[in-house]
Each structure stands twice: as C-alpha cells, then as structure tokens.
Image: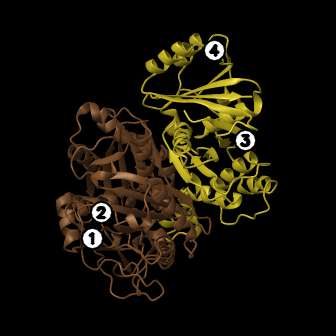
Amino acid sequence: MKRRAFITGKAMICSLGDSLKEIVDAVRHKRIRLDRVPFTLASLPYSKPYYLIERNVTDRLHNRSEAYFYEVLFSAVSRAFLDAGLNKTEIKDMNVFFGSTSMDVPVFEGNHRKSSSTVSGTFLKSSYGYGKIAGAIVERFGIGGNCYSFATACTSSANALLYAAAMIEEGLIERALVVGYDLFNNLGFYGFEALKSIAETDYRPFDRTRDGLILGEACGAVILEGKRRKAGDFMHLGGANLCDTYSVTSHDEEGFAVAETMNRALRQAGILPGDICAVKAHATGTENNDRTECAAMRVTFGCEMPPVTCLKPFIGHTVGACGVNELILFTESVKTGFVPSTPGFREVDDKLNLTPLLENMEADEGIFMLNYFGFGGNCTTLIISNKGDRE
Amino acid sequence: MSEMYIHSASSFIGAENTEANFLKEKLSGYTEENFRRVNRFILLTLLGARQCIHNHALDFDTAIYLTTEHGNLGETASVLDEIYTAGSLPKPFGFINTMSNTAAFYLARNLGVRGRNIMVSSQHLSFERGLELMQVDFALGATGNALIGGVDEALLSRTALEKQTNRVFKMVNGSGWLYVKPVKDGACGAISEIRSFSDGHSCIKWLRERGRSNIDVVSFGALIDDDEVAAMKEILPSVAEFDYLCDYGYSGSATACGVSLFIMLFHGKTLLHISRDQRGHFAVIEVERY
C-alpha cells in the first residue's frame, strides 16, 4: 500500500483571528474584517483595502518590529505542534518547508524605520538570504531536520506542501512542518498597485463586476506525518506543478497549461475528475486569472463541473502564503461539516458562466482539489481527501 | 537512490561588477531572443543554463530547479528605493522581477519547456536541497529530464558572510548548471550520492565507514573550517583537493558552480563535495565524471 502524508496538526493567524474555531465560525457566517491602507509613501490621495492581522495596539501596521514578525510566526508554529500533539523528540525530528513571496522584506522595512540607512541599504547589508526565516524556526524550536524555502510567488507554500508530502510518501522523512507566511509589506502593496491589480472596495472573484485582488496577511502552519493521528485527518492524495510559459504575469486564457496541471494531479492521485467533491479555486478576482481558471476547469471537468469555492474573500490574497492558509481554512471548514460559500459574489459573468457556492455546502468527507497559480507561470494543484477508504 | 546522470554541465562566473549589458552580449551567442525588462539575476540564470544545454534538444516536459541563497538582490533593492526614497509606485516589471522565480520562467520560455518549475533556498545548502527535490521527482516519475542550477549575484556586502566564516573570498556572480536525465546513454557523469548529516561527527563517521574508495577529488563548502577540513583530509589521505572557492571566488551559489566546474575540468574522476550550514548541518554530494 502506498505510504501517505497526513495533515495531523494546524494553526493559522489571519485577519479573522488566531483561533481555528473563531476563524471557521467567521467563515461559516461569512464574517470578514477588512481595513484600508493609504499610500502615504507615494503621497497618493487614496487608500486601498487590505486584510490585516489585528493583534494588539502597539503593533499597528507602521509600528511593527522584527520581534513582531517572529512572534506571529512562532505563535502559529508552536500552536501547530500543540494541535498535532507532538513530543520534543518528534519536534526535533521535523523537517521545515517554508513558502512565502515577501520572505523577510517586512523585517527590512520595519528595521529601516529605526535606522538612518536607506531601506535598500539595510536590505543589502544584512540579507541572510531566503533561508533565513526557516533557519529562525529551527533555531527557536530545536528542530534537527532539513530546511527548504520555496520562492515561487503565489504558489510558494503550495509547492512547499507538495514536496513535503512527496518526501513523506517516498519514505525520505517522517514528518514535516509546512509554513506559509506573508506579512504586510510596502513592496507588495505598492507593487500590486503599480500593476493596477488591487480592487477598490470588496473582493468578488468570478463576479461580472470583479475589479481585482485584495491583499491579505497570514501565517499558517501545518504538520504532515506518515501516520494519521486523529479520525478525519486529511491526507495528500496527489499533486502537480507545471510552468505555463504564456506570460510572466498571466496564464494562457485557453487554460490548457492550467488544465494539464489539474489532470496530472488527478492522475498522480489515481482518481478521475468525477471523484472530486469540490474545487477550491485560486480565484484572485483579476480579469485574467478568473478567465483562465474557469477555462481550465471546463477542460478538466467538462460539463460535470464540481462545486467551486473561493476563499480569498475571507482572508484576502495572502500571496505565497495562500497555499497553506487556504488549505487550513478549507480542511477545517470541512471537518466541521461544510464547504464554504463565496462571499461577495453578486452577478454571473456570462463569459465565465460560473457561479461559485453561494451557500455553505454540507460536507464532512470527500476528495477535494485545491488550485494555486502565480507569477512566473507557476501552476500547482493539490488533491486531498479525508475518506478513510483512500488510505 | 534514483539514477541521475549528468548529460551536460556549465558554470558562468563573472566579476563582482559584471554589467547587465555584458551578460546580454554573452547570452546572444546562445539564443536569438532579445530580453527586455530583465535584470542581472535573470540574465545570469539564462546565461548559465543556456551554456549548459547548448547543443541538447530538450523534452517539452523538462523540469527546472533554480536554487539560490539570495535571489534577486539588486532589483529588490532598487524597487525598495523607488518606494522609500523616490516616494513613488515601483515600475511594474521591476516589481514583478523582485519575485526571483521569474528567472526560472524566462528560462523555461526561452527553452520551450513546460515541466516543473521550482525555486528553492536553504542557507548554504541550497543546491543540495534542490538536488533532493529533483531526486524525489525522479523517484515519483513526476519528471523525466531536469535542468538544475544555482544562481546568485555577488554580495554587495560581506557582513553576513563574515559573521559565519573567517575565510576571505573574492565575491563573484555565479551561475552553475547541470542537465540531468535518468538514462545513462550519452551521459558525461552521474550524481551517485546526496546525503545530509545533522552534525559533523555523523558526517565524519560516514566518511570513515565509506573509506576513500573511488574518490579522487574532494572539495569543501564555504563554511567548513580549517579543523573540519583537516579531520576530513585525514580520512581521505592523498585525495586531491579542488579549492574552487579560492580559484574562482564565492557567490551564494558557489557549490553549484564548483560541482559543474568539476564536471567541466576533471575527466575520469570522482568528486566528493562536502558542505555545511551555519548551524553545523553537513551535506555530501558525490559526482562521477566519466
């Protein structure tokens, strides 16, 4: 029998809070919390929405320190260990898979505020590289395993999940900590505004009136192990990653490369499209992403399209962190009996002809497809299941 | 371990102040594509990889594994300056290129391949971790052929490195690549071992048990100190040392460059490359050159 990777522990911090119960409750009742952030540095006379983490008054957005960055990270990681019920030996034995778009840019931006140097000067003088954050995790928790930091834009932590699961399935490692973390940073906020990609007021993926994405910050941590710990623990059934070379910023609108990624993931999982109970779409709410993704789902599923949910309207587009954080949001919702609906959807786009779930769908067991896409043509699909007969 | 045969290797090493235009000119010898809106990191990636696959026809499904310590250092700094110093929104392509995986995208597009496209980093062991990911994909059958490389711009500051080693290196831009297939036919070498150790003692114990059989050349990563080198050389007496760091200089991707240089320079030999990271984890790569 094929060895599987099970999700045995998880924790996340996002705009909806830091307790899974509180977060799932907000998702069930379509409660969201959206802030607005001005473009002060560029002296622009307007602000844009952002899903910000709210922890305490002293850590307001422009007063954040390096300590805050690591406090959020270590809090999520330690609660994931607790959720899995790991002992010290098991934690020491852990391997770390980290995925992020911004990596430690928020730290440099924070340190810059306290230094006379330019932010680029601070960055160039003290950059310890993309591996720094994973290095800080192993140091803080006494972890003895290897570190892998993925930087593939918005698929970063989805790829971290893909490889952590593959290494467990191949018997190369026993367990893995997979972290997806992106904190607010001006580089990303101003950058996406420069691309004219940020929506004006609210998030409406697949809607005819959609006008872009809304960024969010989140830190999610999951534990993957070769053995199920609790009934209902999800397992990784399969996955795939491919590169769509159509454009550095967008995918081929015919959706063939994205569909090929979905099909390879299905084949690797040993299942057919009809076995999928629901799809968690990447659904950034941008014109191109939604058109491409819709086309790809039609190529893959034909007229037997499974129910589709979009999770970004709850916590924002958490860029490289979305792989882990949307996995947590989705699996925790299913564990409590439902696939989340998509808040904000009002009007069908005739060109897409797709209506995501408008009401929560009852479900406590099944096989699900999770899709993630990113700049640089990166496409990743994960297939997960909590059906006992799939072990 | 899945069989991983090296079919081609290349290393581009440029001076600390290598200009983008110089890289573009060199690159034009390998491809007719005119690259606009690309930076030094992307050009280093393209140049190293194009040199590597120069005369090889690639399968559509070829995977790309780009390993790096620092990614796109220069352009990230420029975009931060645009926002913080100039007080403006960044230029769109400048911002997009701060996501270093765009280098792997431009490479895939230029080569016409659509396989896996992964960028991974791990302090001082990035190339080794990339090889492990490639090994898993080979074992799972997720990929057939692969191009794996390490790319880093020269560090503008030595501060971070100097905190971790007493050795002084010449800083260079580095881009080292291997073209790897699971078939031996036509190969010029093989990766016969990738192994990690949680400390130096375990590594030395493994070296002792393994003995010096088949090993002709040994090389060491930047953080291996003099005592560790001495202890390992004692186990591997009369094995030649390839000190690529001294001969060619340091970049975050020095290991990738060192291994690919070995393939280019040492015909009929076998290399044992030993690295460590700042927390004392060791990794060994064994490479045969036919």
Where is residue A69? Give x, y as percent.
Answer: 32, 52
SS at mark 1? Answer: loop
Q: From the top left corner, tell me how far across and down residue B36 is, in percent.
A: 69, 66
Query: Which of pointers 1 and 3 indicates the residue nearer the eye?
Result: 1
Return the mark for residue B213: 4
Position of the N terminus of chain A, as image quadrant, is top left
A57 lies left or right of B287:
left
Residue A46 - label: none
The residue to which callout 1 is attached is A340
Q: Where does label 2 land, which residue?
A: A330
Relative to A345, A191 lies left or right: right
- Amino acid marked by disc 4: Ser
**How many angstroms separate mark 1 from mark 3 (CA)?**
50 Å
Instruction: State whether discs 3 and 4 lie on one chain.
Output: yes
As drawn, the chain in yellow is: B
> Pointer 2 and pointer 1: residues touching (CB < 8 Å)?
yes
Q: Amino acid at mark 2?
A: Phe
Q: Which class describes the residues within 10 Å of circle 2: few (<14), some (14-19), or many (20+)?
A: many
In front of the other: B173 or B209: B209
Q: Nearer the viewer, mark 3 or mark 2?
A: 2
Q: Nearer the viewer, mark 3 or mark 4?
A: 4
**Kind of residue at disc 3:** Ser
Earlier in the chain: of badge 2 and badge 1, it is 2
In the image: residue B110, left or right of residue A127: right
Q: Chain of mark 3?
A: B
How far is the residue under mark 2 from the one under mark 1?
7 Å
User: Is residue A44 shown to the viewer in this render?
Assistant: yes
The residue that disc 3 covers is B10
Q: Does the CB distance between marks 1 and 4 fall below 8 Å?
A: no
Which image quarter: residue A25? bottom left
Name the tint of chain A in the rendering: brown
Measured as percent of width and height from the top left, residue B151 is found at 62, 46
